[in-house]
Amino acid sequence: MKLEGKSAIVTGGASGFGEGIVRRFVLEGARVVIADLNGAGAEALAGELGNAALGLKVDVTDPADVETMVGSATRFAGGVDILVNNAGIGHTPQPMEALSEAEFDRLFAVNIKSIYRTARQAVPLMKAAGSGAILNMASTAGVSPRPNLTWYNASKGWVITATRSMAIELAGSGVRVNALNPVAGETPLLKTFMGEDTPEIRAKFLASIPIGRFSTPDDMGAAACFLCSDDASMITGVALEVDGGRCI
C-alpha cells in the first residue's frame, strides 16, 4: 500500500499506459480520478475499480475541463497529492515537412500545453500543502529519436526539459517532478507510430529493444507507483527510461 491515503489524477487514464497506472495506484491504496477524452471508458474503468476511482470526461486541451478536473479531484479525494500527465497523441511516420499545421497544433496542444494547463491548476494546491508528486509521460523518442516522427520526438523532448525545469523550481515547495520514458508498447498508439501493424514492422521495432518485448501498462504502473511514492522521496528531475535497453 505504497500510496495509501494519497489522491491522484491520471490524464488519459482510461486505456493503455494510463490504465496500467490507474490500476496500480488503486491497488496501492490511492483514490484516483481517471480523466480521459473517452468519458465512457473512464467511467467504465472507475465502475470496475469501485469507490476508489472516479471517471471523468476531460479534454486536456480545454482550460475549463482542466479546471473542473482538478476541482472534482479535490472534492472526491480531498486534494491532489499526485498528478500524472499521461494524455498524449502521436502522428504517423512521415517526412517532417509533410505534417499538416493542424496536426502539429493538435500535437502541441495535447503533448505540451496540457502540462502547462494542469500545472496552473494543481501546483498552487501542492504548494499550499507543502508536498506533491507530478509525473509527466515523456518517451524514448525524446532521447533517441526515430526518423519520420520529428515533431512527436520534439514534443517529448520538451516534456523532458519541462520536467527538469519544474523539478528545480518546485523542489523548495516540497513538490517532486519526474518523467517516464517508455519504449513503444502494446497500446492504441502503437499502430500510429508504426504506420501499419504487420509482423514484419513489429519484428523491426522489437529488434531495437534488447530485452526483446514491448513495454506494457503494468510496466508503467510499477514505475509510476515508485516515482510517486515516498520510496522516491529523494528523486526529482529524473526522466526514467522504461525501455528494455532501447536507449543504451
Image: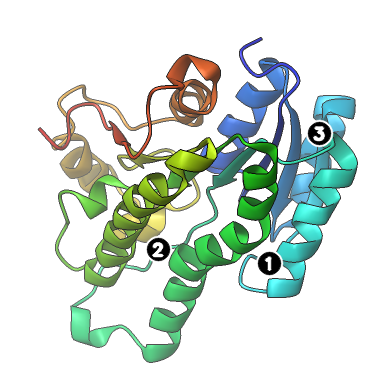
Q: Residue 59 carries which label?
A: 1
Q: Quadrant of the N terminus?
A: top right
Which type of secondary structure does the marked residue at label 2 adopt? loop
Q: Is 232 situated above or below 138?
A: above
Q: Is residue 248 left or right of residue 150?
A: left
> Real-space Cα distance between discs 3 and 1?
18 Å
Where does residue 101 sit, x and y in percent of width and height? 38, 90
Q: Earlier in the sequence, mark 2 or mark 3?
A: 3
Q: Residue furthest left?
A: 248
15 on left or right of 39? left
C-alpha span from label 2 to label 1 = 16 Å
Q: Mark 3 or mark 1, which has the lower sequence index? A: 3
Q: Can residue 196 be seen in this view?
A: no
Q: Mark 3 points at which residue?
A: 53
Q: In percent of the image, x 44 and y 30: which residue is there? A: 216
Query: Does 30 sit left or right of 163 as displayed?
Result: right
Give me the disc on residue 90: 2
Amino acid type assigned to the residue bearing label 3 in the image: Ala
Please name the amino acid that badge 1 sits on.
Answer: Asp
